Image (spheres, coloured by chain):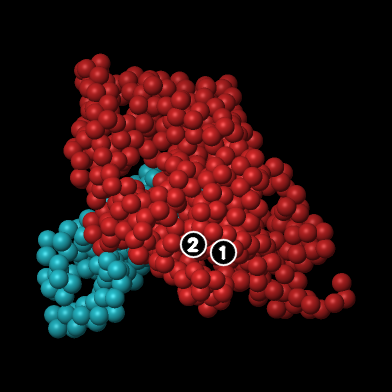
Chain colours: A red, B cyan
Amino acid sequence: MASNSPVTVYVPRDSAARSVGADAVADALRQAAAGRDRPVEVVRNGSRGMLWLEPLVEVATPAGRVGYGPVAPSDVEGLLSAGLLDGGDHPLRRGVVDELPWLARQKRVTFARIGITDPLSTDDYLCHGGLAGLRRALELPRAEVIAEVTESGLRGRGGAGFPAGVKWKTVSECSDELKFVCCNADEGDSGTFADRMVMEGDPFMLIEGMTIAAHAVGAREGYVYIRSEYPDAVATMRAAIDIARGNNWLGERILGSDLTFDLHIRVGAGAYICGEETSMLESLEGKRGMVRSKPPIPALEGLFGKPTVVNNVLTLATVPVIMARGAKAYQELGVQRSRGTQVFQLGGNIARGGIVETAFGVTLRELVEDYGGGTLSGRPVRTVQVGGPLGAYLPASMFDLPMDYEAFAEAGAMLGHGGVVVFDDTVDMAAQARFAMEFCAAESCGKCTPCRVGSVRGVEVIDRIVAGEDRDGNLALLEDLCELMTDGSLCAMGGLTPMPVRSAITHFSDDFLARDAHAAARTARTSGARTEDTA
Amino acid sequence: MSDVPVRAAISAIVAAHRGQRGALLPILHAIQSELGHVPQECVAQLADELNLSRADVHGVVSFYHDFRREPAGRTTVRICRAEACQALGADALVACARDRVGLAPGETAADGSVTVEQVFCLGNCALGPSIQVNDALHGRVSVDRLRSILDEAVSP
């Protein structure tokens, strides 16, 4: 190593990594390296999604990128002395990151670049396959782009699972002068953070996907609606859009083609319901985020009444790779009608939380036990909530369920946006059911009565049940209320809130006993915990 | 703050954003970022300048959790209470805020030092429980850590 060219050290700038000290680690590295004879270049990459190792510091070596984590600022001196810059041995050394089994077993397609590149470097983007999808799309007639997306089997990753190609075709067949492409980046579900990581870790990919959509449907204008809880994602996307404009990846006659398309960021203002597509459109129009009745569908009458593609971040971000590699390569992954990969997000009480991108069909057990390593607390897993706050709570007996849209629907659950939230045996499921109703009451847009009033009544009925007041009568009333909310609500907010509530009652009925009996059952459960399977 | 600079500030913000489609939300964000909150008296002015009804503007301001009617404290601590953080003890953090500074979510200390809020998901679900202190996200927050953050926020 005689050469004095700088050693590249990577410290993620993803906000999850920053939340546990990545900025301080980067500063400590720069300072400590300044006093030594080897020049160091610190690159702020995205996160690999191995979040329990964050801040994960990587150093480029001839053998590959060697990772160390989780690194605290106080570890930096010791790491450098141990030969960090040559991939030297140290208790925090994890080995060559690409070869770590947790990562190597995955099928990274949408997340292929995330954690590897500097998110705002156009050189990095181009060196790692960026723009190949857009370049190919621009050479094809619109109808062929749509056919390719349809053939890939890509379904909306936001939760509803509607085929993306079908939606695009509807918009493309409208003759209006003005059409829009809207990206729903209001990722409000607890346990989901993949959209945030895409925007912070590979923003050009989302821009490229939206530009391909614009070409396919004939839109000239697009919006990314990002929730205000994600300030880093907002800042990175804004910076990326400016850079893209400067490189003619956005704007007039993109990359020398006939396509003119520009993109704008809109920031939400703290309303979960604006993740629902029609509420989001209302909010983009500057109004209260009230759900619209469908029909008309947004594809025909969307933003400002014009034909509009509304897709989730992951959906649009997956389009470039489909166009670059062809529909068949993507379609070959997955099972039955769930094609391609799904980006699962492991969170809550879990030892190894993060991003697991894999083909559909993986089981919950593989995710929670193999990838996740069980609970962080070391206690037994009691339940896993899949698909966000409106998703079902599943007991350990259902952990062999394959993760695909249809299998989950059949089991009375849903995949949603792929969030997997783990709870240990100390969880009180009556409290979780009550919270589901309380959350709905707080976040309902108020337009329809089953959701607005039903959720308030739901909290009251659950309170009466756990107070031991006419338990059977009130459980019957709660079931009746759940049925009414499911059948009578205008959108998924009221329509799906019964899902966590009903699943909690079905699988954890003991928790709905009167408080005294419940407390006794809980003590018995948690004190005998070690005899159960500990994942 | 006298009315005249507020009126002028709002007019300037409206002028800067008027060209955008559906400009009301970006305008309200800009007002809050400049003035620290959305004062009640701006409703009539916005209605007037944007050719909307007062009810429309009031309806939007009151619909979204982000828009404040009163200024926040110098430090805002937002505690995530969504399921993933609940699974790791978010409620203990809320209890800590209540014990340490006597504030429930949504309340501001009388001396204007700190505001405690609740939030449902900061997107840090694998590293919970999470809080946001002003704009900075913190993961794996213990009760002790929150206590020292709050102590620092209230000390003069």
Q: Residues within 10 Å of mark 2 (few under 14, many from 20)?
A: many
Where is residue A262, by image quadrant?
bottom left
User: Quick check: marks 2 and 1 in contact, CB under 8 Å?
Assistant: yes
| Rendered location of residue A224, percent (x, y) | 41, 61
Mark closest to the chain's N terminus, 2 or 1 = 1
- The type of residue carrying mark 1 is Leu
**Amino acid type at image mark 2:** His
| Chain letter for mark 1 | A
Which residue is at the front of the view, A409 or A53?
Answer: A409
Image coords of residue A474 (percent x, y): 23, 21
Task: Please give the residue where the numbered disc 1 appears in the rendered image.
Answer: A138
Q: Quadrant of the N terminus of chain A?
A: bottom right
For image coordinates 75% across by 64% down, the residue present is: A60
User: Picture coordinates of residue A287 (x, y %)?
Assistant: 23, 59
Left/right placement of residue A356 relative to residue A394 reads right
The x and y percentages for residue A46 are 59, 61
Chain to which the residue tagged by mark 2 belongs:
A
